[in-house]
Image (tube, rainbow, N blue to C red):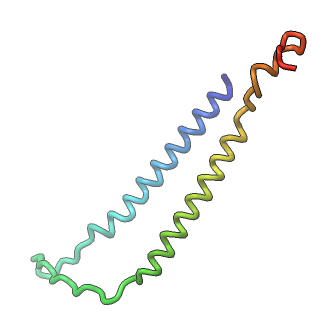
């Protein structure tokens, strides 16, 4: 019973920390996103659209980033699976293993 209370408290504190980080990120980034420069006359004029940037990221670089991300995700999945399976209690090998030799018909 005591272990359950600690687990729920740990999960709740993790959830609150994540929500706090999310709110902080939204507040910090929204201030820059909503910024507008008004001319001295007080009348807002829509700026002309900027020319598109020339170049960009090459396709081979995007491919390498995607492969790296997939490898990292696969390694983390394997490590998580091993951590979960290490915490489980070993299952009983077989039902016949618990039967004494005299009763068992297998020789």
Residue farthest along the top direction in this orientation: 103
Above or below, 91 relative to 37? above
**Closer to us: 35 or 94:** 94
Residue located 78% across and 19% down the image: 96
Q: Give the x, y percent position of residue 89.
A: 73, 31
Q: Give the x, y percent position of residue 43.
A: 9, 77
Residue farthest along the right direction in this orientation: 102
Query: In which quarter of the view is residue 39 placed?
Result: bottom left
Residue located 75% across and 24% down the image: 94
**Closer to us: 65 or 105:** 105
Above or below, 33 relative to 89? below
**How many marks do you count on the picture?**
0
Left or right of residue 51, residue 74 in this image = right
Q: Give the x, y percent position of residue 103.
A: 85, 10
> Which image quarter is the C terminus in?
top right
Residue located 72% across and 41% down the image: 86
**Closer to us: 13 or 1:** 1
Query: In which quarter of the view is residue 4 placed?
Result: top right
Left or right of residue 33, residue 101 in this image = right
Above or below, 78 relative to 89? below
Q: Give the x, y percent position of residue 106.
A: 83, 19
> Which image quarter is the N terminus in?
top right
């Amino acid at each position: 019973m005591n272990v359950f209370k600690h687990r729920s408290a740990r999960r709740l504190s993790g959830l609150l920390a994540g929500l706090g980080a999310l709110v902080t990120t939204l507040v910090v980034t929204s201030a820059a996103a909503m910024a507008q420069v008004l001319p001295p006359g007080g009348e807002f004029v829509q700026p002309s659209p900027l020319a598109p940037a020339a170049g960009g990221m090459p396709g081979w670089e995007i491919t390498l980033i995607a492969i790296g991300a997939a490898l990292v995700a696969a390694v983390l999945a394997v490590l998580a699976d091993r951590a979960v399976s290490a915490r489980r209690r070993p299952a009983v090998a077989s039902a016949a293993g618990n039967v004494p030799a005299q009763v068992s018909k297998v020789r």
